[in-house]
Image (cartoon, helix red, strand yellow):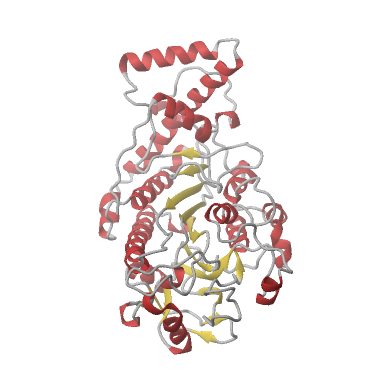
């Protein structure tokens, strides 16, 4: 996996990211004044009681989750081997899991014998420790869909099915209607009374701009961090720092509205940086060796591991901010496995396994595991049948797939929802094993938004398609 490298930014890059990522327009500053020192940032009145954090780990490209979680026996295993063919994985290589109750299968049966990918021994351990669960065959839906309704085109479907960009936006917002906001951004916005810090947004992105953290009313925008921490100006010291600060002070006092806005963004970015830096200092005071924790989990300092390490530090240093309902976004790329599924997916699964275990262990060391829920999902699953029949065969864009949830409060050790029966050309199969989802992505997202504190009435405003599924869901993911 690629090694993490510090990212350098020019002055223009910094201001651009400030406009897009800091959200100065959302936070009114009473005066420009002097920049906050680290000491002053520490001295700000803070409160972090009743803290809950949501982390979305987004597997961009379409995770082949039916080779992530695999049946190990019975008719379901037989159909797995028949359908997957050259890309099937031997049951002896899998890491078996013990379900606390049998999984429901689409054909009306139940099944209990499953295992995780050979590269995921620690994810299997988390599942067996009831610290992780799976929502089976979830995906973007506007309303429940049967195979007959799909074939007759008699039911509303998510726009542009099988399109990466469209389906990514939909799982990060809502499959029905035009895109107006992301569900993570709207959740943080509705919980503004719990996210009161005027310096740093509760929306923290480790992976740049994204649909998930777009707010509806523009009250807050995502604050972007690099994979290993703060994004700062290049060589911002000495004479250069003095010149820039004087220039911004002059712009702030000018009659030109654009100059004032420019200065306001800069000022907000600098104040936010001081608070974020204070958060990292708070984390360091806990004496936790994050590098050792992630290394022990099999870490290779991959981009995903470094991003989750930074998220853990931000959570550990939360005493430096009054935001008690932060929403984090971490993207992991590379899942568009049209070719070389077995080799490419194995490397991705190994990285994900180390990343989640390292993140879990860091949160445990901090005492925060019960305060954080991590969702791991993708824009869609992939076709059950392979592209080709050789050693480098891959899979195409699919529909339903498995999501995973990790945390101390989740209902762990279970395969929730309804698992496909793997019967091709019938039941859930729209072609080549593109399974119709049996659980809506919005039902999963709504349960997490509710856990964060959003009311059921507001959930229907964030996810209007919930009305087609009987309203807000009954608890399944959260215990």
- State the residue at coordinates (27%, 54%): 300
Q: From the image, which quarter does the N terminus lie in?
A: bottom left
User: Who is closer to the viewer here, 83 or 193?
Assistant: 83
Give percent across and percent down for residue 239: 32, 13
Q: In this picture, is 378 found above or below 89?
A: above
> On the picture, is 72 further left or further right than 294?
right
Residue 25 percent across, percent down from the top left: 59, 29
* In this rendering, position of residue 193 left or right of residue 229: right
* Vertical position of residue 17 compared to residue 228: above or below: above
Question: Is residue 419 in view from this perspective?
Answer: yes
Q: Nearer the viewer, residue 237 or 105?
A: 105
Q: Position of residue 134 (x, y in %)?
A: 49, 69
Q: Is residue 289 at all visible to an observer of this figure? A: no
Residue shown at 35% from the left, 37% from the top: 281
Place of residue 454 in the rendered image (x, y in percent of width and height, measured from the top left): 64, 53
Residues 441 and 379: in front is 379
Q: Residue at point 60% right, 71% down?
A: 436
Query: What residue is shown at x 31% (from left), y 38% (from top)?
Result: 6
């Amino acid at each position: 996996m690629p090694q993490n490298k510090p990212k350098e930014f020019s002055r223009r890059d910094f201001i651009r990211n400030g406009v897009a990522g800091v959200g100065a327009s959302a936070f009114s500053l009473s005066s420009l004044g002097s920049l906050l020192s680290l000491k002053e940032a520490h001295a700000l009145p803070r409160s972090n009681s009743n803290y809950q954090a949501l982390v979305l780990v987004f597997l961009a490209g379409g995770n082949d989750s039916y080779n992530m979680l695999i049946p190990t026996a019975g008719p379901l295993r037989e159909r797995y081997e028949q359908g997957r063919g050259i890309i099937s994985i031997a049951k002896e290589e899998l890491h078996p899991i013990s379900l606390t109750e049998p999984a429901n299968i689409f054909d009306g049966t139940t099944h209990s014998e499953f295992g995780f990918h050979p590269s995921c021994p620690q994810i299997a351990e988390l599942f067996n420790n009831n610290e992780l669960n799976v929502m089976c065959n979830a995906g973007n839906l506007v309303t429940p869909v049967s195979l007959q309704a799909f074939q007759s085109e008699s039911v509303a479907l998510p726009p542009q099915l099988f399109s990466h960009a469209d389906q990514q936006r939909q799982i990060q917002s809502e499959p029905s209607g035009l895109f107006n906001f992301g569900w993570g951004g709207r959740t943080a916005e509705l919980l503004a009374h719990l996210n009161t810090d005027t310096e740093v947004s509760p929306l923290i992105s480790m992976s740049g701009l994204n649909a998930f953290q777009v707010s509806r009313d523009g009250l807050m925008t995502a604050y972007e961090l690099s994979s290993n921490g703060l994004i700062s100006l290049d060589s911002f010291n000495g004479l250069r720092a003095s010149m820039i600060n004087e220039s911004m002070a002059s712009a702030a006092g000018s009659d030109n509205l654009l100059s004032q806005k420019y200065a306001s963004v800069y000022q907000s970015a600098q104040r936010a940086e001081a608070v974020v830096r204070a958060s990292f200092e708070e984390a360091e005071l806990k004496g936790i060796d994050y590098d050792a924790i992630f290394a022990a989990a099999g870490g290779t300092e991959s981009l995903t591991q470094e991003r989750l390490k930074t998220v853990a530090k931000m959570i550990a240093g939360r005493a430096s901010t009054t935001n008690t309902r932060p929403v984090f976004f971490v993207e992991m790329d590379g899942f568009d496995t049209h070719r070389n599924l077995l080799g490419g997916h194995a490397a991705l699964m190994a990285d994900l396994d180390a990343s989640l275990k390292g993140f879990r262990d860091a949160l445990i060391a901090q005492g925060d595991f019960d305060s954080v829920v991590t969702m791991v999902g993708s824009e869609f699953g992939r076709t059950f049948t392979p592209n080709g029949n050789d050693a480098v065969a891959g899979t195409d864009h699919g529909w339903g797939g498995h999501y995973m949830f990790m945390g101390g409060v989740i209902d762990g050790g279970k395969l929730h929802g309804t698992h496909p029966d793997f019967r091709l050309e019938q039941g859930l199969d729209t072609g080549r094993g593109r399974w119709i989802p049996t659980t809506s992505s919005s039902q999963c997202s709504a349960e997490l938004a509710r856990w964060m504190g959003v009311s059921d009435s507001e959930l229907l405003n964030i996810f209007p398609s919930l009305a087609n599924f009987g309203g807000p869901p009954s608890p399944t993911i959260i215990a």
